[in-house]
Each structure stands twice: as structure tokens, then as C-alpha cells.
Image: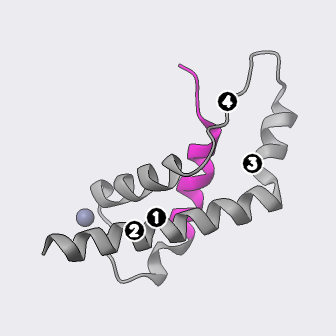
Amino acid sequence: MTKNYMEILVKNALNEIIDKYDICKCDKCKKDIMAIALNNLPPKYFLSSNDESEKTSFLLDRQIKISVLAKVIEAIEIFTSKKNLAL
Ligand SMILES: [Zn+2]
């Protein structure tokens, strides 16, 4: 199956910052937050002709990491505000 590399970055970013937030950290909530963030980020797929170094440089790109982090923070805010509305 084709892998969306953006998903790896979103997952890493979420795991990095989730402890700073007073929110539920179960798999279901994490997946919801990831889904919100991924909806707001362009997916990244590599072709079979792409080599590992291209994948690695995508995953290590500082600028991409910063924008992913921003979207994950945004997703946490959207997620918590939706939860509060539901209560
Ligand atoms: Zn939860």
C-alpha cells in the first residue's frame, strides 16, 4: 500500500507535544487529532523511483516540521473545542 509520509510527521509531532496539553491521550482521540491535522496538510507520497534519501530528507526537513507542528496544535484546538461543544 502507498504510504502517506505526512502521516509519519503528524504522528511524531503529536507525540512530541501531546503531554503539554490536558487532553485525553487514548488512541481514538489521537487518531481524531491526526485526522484533523492531515485534512489540513497536503499528503506526501513517494514513487517507487524515489530513493530512501529523498524520503529521509522529507522527514527531516525543518520547515516542513514547523508547519506540521503548527497544524497539529491547530488540530488539538479544533478537537478540544468540538469536545467542549458536545458536552
Ligand atoms: Zn480519548
> Which amino acid is tagged 1?
Ala
Q: Which residue is mark 1?
A: 75
Q: Do the numbered discs 2 and 4 sit on residues whose CB atoms are within 8 Å? A: no
The stretch of residues the image draws in magenta is 1-16
What residue would you read off at disc 2?
Answer: 78
Residue 67, how many percent across, how many down?
Answer: 69, 62
* Mark 2: C-beta under 8 Å from nearest atom of ligand 1: no
Percent x, y for residue 11? Answer: 53, 54
Front label number (4 vs 3): 4
Q: Give neighbour class at mark 3: few <14, some 14-19, many 20+ (Cα, 10 Å).
A: some
Q: Residues within 10 Å of mark 2 (few under 14, many from 20)?
A: some
**Are the residues at dot 2 and dot 1 in contact (C-beta closer than 8 Å)?**
yes
Foreground: disc 2 or disc 4? 2
Q: Residues within 10 Å of mark 1 (few under 14, many from 20)?
A: many
Residue at mark 4 = 45
Direction from residue 61 to residue 17 in the image, left or right: left
Q: For the residues marked 2 and 3, what is the alpha-carbon distance in whole angstroms?
A: 25 Å
Ligand 1 sits in quadrant: bottom left
Q: Quadrant of residue 87?
A: bottom left
* Residue shown at the point (85%, 35%) measured from the top left: 54
